[in-house]
Amino acid sequence: MATLQLHNIVKRFDDTEVIKGVDLEVNDREFVVFVGPSGCGKSTLLRIIAGLESATSGDIMIDGKRINEVGPAERGLAMVFQSYALYPHMTVEDNMGFSLKLAGVPKEERRRKVREAASILQLEPLLERKPKALSGGQRQRVAIGRAIVRNPSIFLFDEPLSNLDAALRVQMRIELARLHEELDATMIYVTHDQIEAMTMADKIVVLQGGVVEQVGSPMELYHHPRNRFVAGFIGSPK
Ligand code: ADP
Ligand code: MG
């Protein structure tokens, strides 16, 4: 099980406050989407959760334990970025197993975990290939595979589909939903795309200017937007 709580998270870069006191509750196995316009603080908030950025103030809790001072590798999370950042000289198998290698996991176990993830993602026929011989969608699946092998308690996705064409994006949304079911995992997914948010989320967090405007299910946001911004952004009639 993995729950996440944010308590009054503030982030300042120099004199500019970009996250302005965010409170949030993510439940076990929930698919939570952070949505909002470019520059509203989505990536910063996700990086704070991942431990890649420290909060100026506030607390981050996983399963009730404060983890502000816990390093990114020890948080039990895995992040998938927009730019896949695969190692070009390594095969798909080595790309997927690399973090396990760094963690000292023995070769046979690495192999087993990579094959398991490859089977979930239908990457088995591609394990010997290098990234340059893959399509965009296949590369993105490898990036997701790198996260799966680590068996994280929470997956963090930062606009993972925005480099893909429209048709592939639709297909990958379906695959991610299937993955969420299959892995029984907690997932936090960042996007500026309202359609992605509405179709994928159990719970949507609408951000604007470093502030949470509203949290709710897609239906709640659509039928009961709290203000004009949410209504306009979600595209509801209010
Ligand atoms: P989003 O992901 O929603 O587009 P970001 O979290 O990337 O937004 O950025 C939020 C704000 O913080 C932006 O105004 C951005 O310019 C600023 N910002 C992000 N990272 C840094 C940084 N390392 N130094 C200074 N400002 C930053
Ligand atoms: Mg971003």
Image: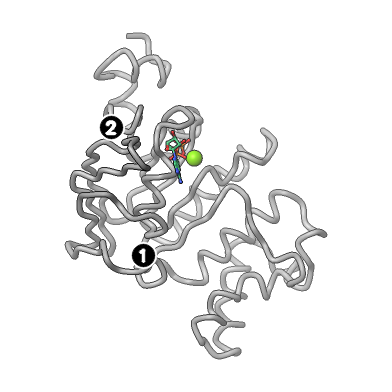
Within 10 Å of disc 1 (Cα), the crowding (few <14, some 14-19, many 20+) is some
Name above or below for residue 35 compared with residue 156. above
Name above or below for residue 80 compared with residue 218. below
Front residue of 99/18: it is: 18
Q: Where, quadrant-wise, is the N terminus in this rendering?
A: bottom left
What residue sits 74% from the left and 72% below the top?
A: 91
Front residue of 216/190: it is: 190
Name above or below for residue 89 compared with residue 12. below
Please state the horizontal and vertical placement of residue 125, each as a whole percent of the image. 75, 68
What residue sits 41% from the left and 33% below the top?
A: 35
Please tell me whether mark 1 or mark 2 is closer to you in this view: 2
Which of pointers 1 and 2 lies earlier in the amino acid sequence?
1
Within 10 Å of disc 2 (Cα), the crowding (few <14, some 14-19, many 20+) is many
Label of residue 212 in the image = 2
Name above or below for residue 160 compared with residue 129. above
Q: Quadrant of residue 69?
A: bottom left
Front residue of 223/149: it is: 149
Please state the horizontal and vertical placement of residue 92, each as a whole percent of the image. 70, 69
What residue sits 43% from the left and 31% below the top?
A: 198
Q: Say what secondary structure mark 2 lies in.
A: strand
Please state the horizontal and vertical placement of residue 219, each as a whole percent of the image. 32, 26
Q: Which residue is mark 1?
A: 153
> Looking at the picture, which amino acid does disc 1 mark?
Ser
In the image, 126: left or right of 203? right
